[in-house]
Each structure stands twice: as structure tokens, then as C-alpha cells.
Image (spheres, grey):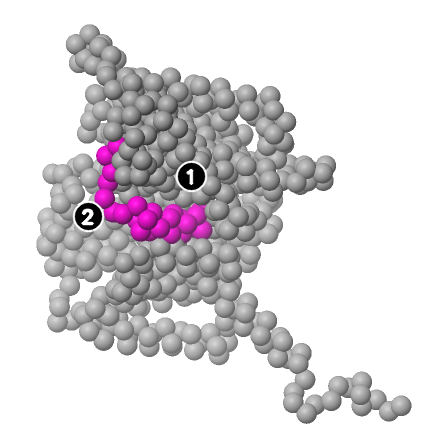
Amino acid sequence: MGLDSLALQLLNGLSHATTLFLMASGLTLIFGVTRIVNFAHGSFFMLGALWAAHALTDWWPALADTAWSYALTMLLGALVAALGGAMAELLLLKRMRQAPELYQLVATFGLSLALHDAMRGFFGPNEVFAPRFAGLKGAVQLGEAYFPTWQLFTLALGPLVWLGLHLLLTRTLWGQRVKAATQDRDMLDALGVSPAPLMLGVVMLGCGLAGLAGALQLPREPAHLQMDVSVVVETFVVVVTGGLGSVGGAFAAALLIGVIHALGVSFVPQATLVLVFLTMAVVLVLRPQGLAGAPVQAPQRESVPVFSLAPSGRAGGLIWLAVLALAVWALGQGDYAQSLAEDVLVMALFGLSLQWMMALGGLVSFGHAAFFGLGAYGAALSHLLGGAGLALSLLAGMALALVAAAVFGLLVVRLSGVYMAMLSLALAQMVWAGATQWVALTGGDNGLIGLRLLDPDTRWVFGLLLCTLVLASVAALARASRSSRGAALQALRDAPLRAAASGLPVARLRYQVFVGSAVLAGLAGGLWAAVKGAVFPSVASVATSVDALLVILLGGVHQLWGALAGSALLVWGGAELGRGLAYWRGLLGVVIMLVMVLAPSGLVGGLLSWAGRTGQARRQTPADGATDAADRVPR
């Protein structure tokens, strides 16, 4: 490769870094002040792009004739995104402020689903090609290569935005109050400064920056409805690599990621998908707090709820019988109901694997799909290449997940919180990229098809096996929560410093629960391959990891039956909505947000709490015709 081409790729990387920085700085500001991890940040990026694109092409095409009117339209797109952020803050984010980070993440994921369908209904499903930016349509010659003038402009815009944010946060009263709110919001409130307007302003600024980043893409690519997902994961990578809450760290990380991505395209195009996540993984292993984040400390989290086995006694026994009877009934109701019941049970088993980690050990993973995918590919390859039957294929998938978890666990369990979750995501993305690009082994996007692990005539036996595995895993989780090892895990989850001081082998316990959880996820992945008869790279994608989180958080991460209830809501509920509604994803997003706001402990926890309050009210209310004891006292 010549120097001209190398310089061109570096400039492309720096131009892309501007987009990443605008996105990451907005997400960093929102997290720094509100402490909310906003998964819907990519939706505001897409909103700014779609609004500006339609304004320039459909509504007021004359605005594209001059540079000033084109730039004004981009700024108006950013303003629309900022107003959308204000509505999200007033309707959802402020209600989730005291919730744990994972519940915030799931609620904002529901928001992203709702916004996606709302934009699809308003703007339409087609992509929009906006005209080139007036006055910056040419290219600058670099030797024998040419670099677009517009990208040269965006390259210079990144440092200017960073300088503007730096001056805003350090030289203005509003910025000083924002920085104070990031340090101690309650103290700021005690000094007479209401944090609510500050948070609203920060959310609007962050979403406006995302909308501006989206609008700036129009001269180089069309606006479309897949923009949100494609950019939000990379934005999270930049934020975590730079360090949570650090705008300067986000700027440095954006430059680093942008340049590495550009160089990867030039030198190792086969590894382009992996390089970004590999960079984040290396940074987090060497510097767990990111490039400029605060040092990671193990907090004392005394408020974590105790793992609940309710209902117990006779009611608990009826639950076991009801689940078994319902599963058997569904498996015998025809092909559609049988297939749906199998999906529910497999996803419940996958959710249970993550619940072991989170409920007992307090370990959070955004990349649990890696082991689910490895289990699926291990089962499929052993069947296709070695002719293995169902049992051996499942064992092969579990073994592959075990090997990967034994290696990944050495790195992951050193971290905690969001940093641990993002490192697990980075490792999972490497598995996904390998499945996508190792075409000779995995088939790439064409997948591995033609699996015949199940006999159609005895499919009901497989259904009973699934039901047995799920109930056995639930029973094992209940037993583990009552055991001495379960108590030790919950101790290091709730008070890690005290657990270490008490002599508990914290690192070993975390490693063991991580590996055990991965093996169970591998079993679920192998069963998924058997059910579907094919395996594609999507089984190891971010979306699959999010599904596992949704399953246990919707059902209740600290509830014994949470994974099964969450799986029924997500899989069965989503399938039923999808049969009759064009915008079923948006409705599902609304349901997810309502569950997170109204029942933060999940469906099972909310139902148990409601039943407890109802029973207490009935006990306190005198029966009909009864007389208060005080009225019967002789006078």
C-alpha cells in the first residue's frame, strides 16, 4: 500500500472519529449526570438524520441549495433530537433514576424499540438519499488519491466540538453545576440548586449531539432505519474505552477507535469486525477504568435483594405442577404451538444461565451470547462433520463453551459493573465476528443448515426433555441459593470488601460461577441448534445477549421463576403481537418500559408484591357483620 492510500485511510478514520465522538460525548454527559446507561442513544442519532434528510429532499428541497440553509437544516435535525430527548427524560428517564443500571438499560432498550417503530410509521420504511452539501461537493487531491471535502470538514469539526464542550463545562456556571451534579447530586440539591433542570438540559444536549452526528452523515450516506443499532454498540465501545463520565477520554478513545478501524480496513480487512472490540478488551485488561475514567472500586451494595424462592409450601408445589402441565399442553397443540413452546423453554434455559451469574454472584454480562453461540456451533459441527447424535452434539457444544469460558473468565472476573459487562461484550463480538468471517468452517452468513438432530415422529419426547431440563435447572438454582456456596456468592455480591476480609476466595468463586453459567448457556445453544435445524452467526450477536438480559429482568432477576416468566413474555408475547400488528416491536417496547417502571423487580416480583399487599389488606379489613373489638368493650 502506498503512502497516499495510507494517508487516505487515516483521514477516513479521523473523519469517522468525529461521528463517534459526537455520539460518545453525548452519552458520556447523560451518564455522568443522570447515571443512566441510555441504550436508545442511537435512536436520536437516527432521528436527527431522518428528519434532516426528509427536510432536504421531501419537505423543503430548496434548503439544499445553499450551504447556510443546509447547515441550518442539520442544526434543526439536532434540535428535533434534543426535543425527543426531553420527552424521553420527562416520561421515562427520570422515573428510572433510582433503578439499577441494568434495569435502566432494559427500559431504554424498550424505548429504542418504541422510537424505531414510531419513526418507521412517520418517515416510512425507505432509505433517503440527501443531496451533497452545497459548497463542499468536491475532493482534495492527495497524490494520486482524492479525499472528499465534506469529510475534511467533519474531521476538523471534532476538535472544535471538544473545545466547545470543554469551555461549556469549565467556564460557565451551568457547566460548573453539571460537574458538581456528577460528583454529588444530593449535596447540590442541599445547596439550593435543583438537579432536575440540569438533568433535563444535559439529556437534551446529549441527544442533540447524537442528532447532529446523524445529520452530518447525510452528505456521505443515506438515512435509513438501521442506523440506530449499527452506531450505538460502537458508541458504547468508545465510552467504555475512554472511561465512563470522561468527555476527554471519549475524545481520545474516538480517535483511537477511528484510526484502528481505518488501518484494519487497509491491512487486515478480514479482522475489521474484531479490531474495535479487541482494542476495548486490551484497554480494559490493562486499565480497568478505561483511558481516563475513575479507578474502579468494589462498592458495598447492601441494598441488593435476597434471592426469593416464593411462593413456597403448597402454593410452590402447585406452581411446579402448573408449569409442567402448561408445557405438556402447549407441546401437544400443533406445530406452531409446539415450536413456540420449545423456543420459550430454550430461551428460559438461556436466561437461567445468566440468572445464576447475576442473582447469586452479582456478575453482569452483555456478551453471554458468546457461549450460547459456541454451544450451537459445537453441536452443529459435531453433527455435520462427525455424525454425532443429539446427546453427543449437546456435549460437544457444552465442551466448546467450557473451553472458551475457562479462558475468558480469567479476564472478565477481574472487573465489575459496566466495565465487566462491556469486556464480556467485546469477547462475544470476537466470537460473532469469527462465526461471520470463518466461512470455511461456519458457512459465514449462509450458516450451517440441514441439521437433523431431532426425529419428527418423537418430537414430543424432545419437548419433555426440554421441560425436564428447565425444571431441573430451576430446582438446582433454588438448591444453590440455600447452600453454603450460594450464601458465599451472595455475600461477595452484596459486600465484596467484607467478603474478601472474611477470607472468602472471591476470585475463585466468581470464576466458578462464570464458567458454570457459560456451560449452561452452551447447553441452551445446542438445544437451539437442534430445534431450528440450522445455526447462523446471529446466535452470538449482541441482540441475543440482550434477549437473555430481557428474559431475566422482565421476569425478575432475583425471583426463582423469573427466567421462565420473562421468556414467556418476550418469546410468546412477541410472537403473538407479531401475528396481527405491523408495529408490534414498538408495542413490545412500551410493555418493556411499563414493566421496568411499574414493577422494577420484574413480573414475578411485582405479582408477589401485589398478592402480599392484597392478602394483608384482607386480613386487616373486618369481615362483613363483624364489630370492632373496641365497640364491644363494656362502658
Which amino acid type corresponds to the residue marked 1 in the rendered image?
A: Val
Residue 553 lies in what quarter of the image?
bottom left
- Asked if the residue under mark 2 is in contact with the one under mark 1, i.e. CB atoms within 8 Å, the reply is no
For disc 1, the marked residue is 80
Quadrant location of the C terminus?
Answer: bottom right
Residue shown at 26%/26% (left/top)?
Answer: 132
Does label 1 or label 2 sit earlier along the sequence? Answer: 1
Up the image or down, 583 lies above or below 514; here it is: below
Up the image or down, 610 lies above or below 20; here it is: below
Could you say where residue 563 lies in the image, as x and y percent from the top left?
40, 60
Which amino acid type corresponds to the residue marked 2 in the rendered image?
A: Phe
Foreground pick, 18 / 406: 18
Q: Residues within 10 Å of mark 1 (few under 14, many from 20)?
A: many
Residue shown at 51%/45% (left/top)?
Answer: 89
Foreground pick, 456 / 481: 456
Could you say where residue 516 lies in the image, as x and y percent from the top left?
37, 51
For disc 2, the marked residue is 536
Looking at the image, residue 407 sits to the left or right of residue 509; the answer is left
Q: Nearer the viewer, mark 1 or mark 2?
A: 1
Residue shown at 44%/36% (left/top)?
Answer: 79
Up the image or down, 629 lies above or below 482; here it is: below
Prevalent SS, magenta region: helix
Q: In terms of secondary structure, where does tag 1 sit?
A: helix
Foreground pick, 290 / 141: 141
**Magenta span covers which residues?**
105-130
Which labelled disc corresponds to residue 418?
none
Could you say where residue 225 lies in the image, as x and y percent from the top left?
28, 43
Residue 300: tell me if it is visible: yes
Residue 499: tell me if it is visible: no
Up the image or down, 473 lies above or below 400; here it is: below
Residue shown at 30%/30% (left/top)?
Answer: 62
Residue 191 belongs to magenta span: no
